[in-house]
Image: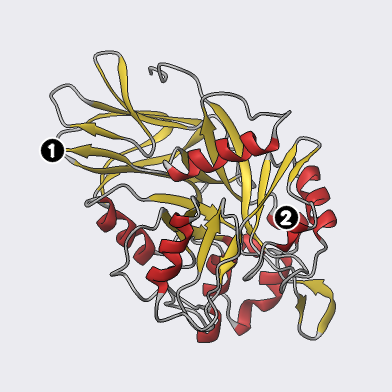
Amino acid sequence: MRNMDAPLYDYAGAIHIHSNLSDGTGAVPMIIEQARQAELDFIILTDHEHLEARELGYEGWRGNTLCLVGEEITPRFHNHYLAFNIRRPIRGRGNWRRPQAFIDETRRQGGIGFIAHPIGDDYPVRGMAKPWLDWEVDGFTGIELWSYMHDWARNLRWKNIARALRDPDSLLRGPHPKALKRWDEIGKRRRVAAIGTLDIHAKRAPGLPCAKILPYRHAFRTIRTHVLTEYPLAQNDPNEAGRQVYEALAHGRAYIAHDGFGDGAGFQFFAAKGGRTTALMGGETQMSAGLELYVKAPEKCSVTLLRDGEPIAQTNGKTLEAPAEKPGVYRIEARKEGRPWIYSNAVYVRG
């Protein structure tokens, strides 16, 4: 099994976190400390409709954990949007019928944006879903493919509430099939990055004053987005380190892993020809004879290679090699002991 031409640095982060500056229960210093204890390399706070955590001076390095501050643009009903690397808050309230406006504003500010919890099916309480409805929009960077809170909530029922609070991981099924299908379809037209998130608030469980719903300490050890950078994150310059994280997210040079099921660090997926890497995750390459796809997982697992959403190769092990026989959107799904584990960003093979 060959490796990529140049090794990349792998940093694991937790994205889409709410503090008590909006509708979460945790103070930002406590959230940062628990992220440090979970050995996260970075976190991105996304309180609703403001950037107050940045204004209060929380953005930057805290030990070995980089705290970044974004915003969840939050219309009342639908079409929520995660905006990162923006200079000023962007108003979503009252604008749910015009999501293109805040997508465009995010780009005007030099930021990147991800459609949040895109699918609203299967929820026991419809008001929890707040799905994305307008798929005629353009200019978004990517989508929130796998959200811990939304995967958990979709599978919550009265009969499993006790288990859901005691062992929330037991409810997880992976990204919604419709989200995966939508992502594959968009990828046929253009590159679109995927991220894994938490969307946590750590709210009190109704009627159970000692229990919290998806507490920060637990969630920080679950779904993470691993970004791949060419150089180590700039420890002496938080602005540059933030730029490195956002650049990797923007280009899809990242993968999603539930690190509580097994540390995903070291996962690789790339295209190569003639001993030379032609595309990393998130990248494009031209279809040509001899083009191969390579996968390397950090632990033995069930690895599936998909093209345009259809499985074309599968193995139980740590490596997979397969020819790219025709153009398509190629990506990886890996399961560990039957549980959803790693979802790669795509390699786009164009005709």
Q: Quadrant of the C terminus?
A: top left
Instruction: Look at label 2 and name its amino acid.
Output: Arg
The reply to whether residue 125 is visible in this rendering is: no
Q: Residue at x 31, y 47 (%)?
A: 191
Quadrant of res 104 = bottom left
Q: How is the image coloured?
A: secondary structure
Relative to 233, say whether 35 is above or below.
Answer: below
Point out residue 350 in the picture as x, y percentages from the top left corner: 18, 38
The reply to whether residue 203 is visible in this rendering is: yes
The local secondary structure at tag 2 comes to: helix
Numbered label attached to residue 351:
1
Instruction: Look at label 1 and name its amino acid.
Output: Gly
Q: Which badge, 2 or 1, is on the more N-terminal residue?
A: 2
Q: Nearer the viewer, mark 2 or mark 1?
A: 2
Residue, disc 2: 54
Point out residue 17 in the picture as x, y percentages from the top left corner: 66, 60
Q: 10 Å neighbourhood of mark 1: few (<14), some, or many (≥20)?
A: few
Point out residue 76 in the picture as x, y percentages from the top left corner: 54, 83
The local secondary structure at tag 1 comes to: loop
* Left or right for 283, reference 6: left
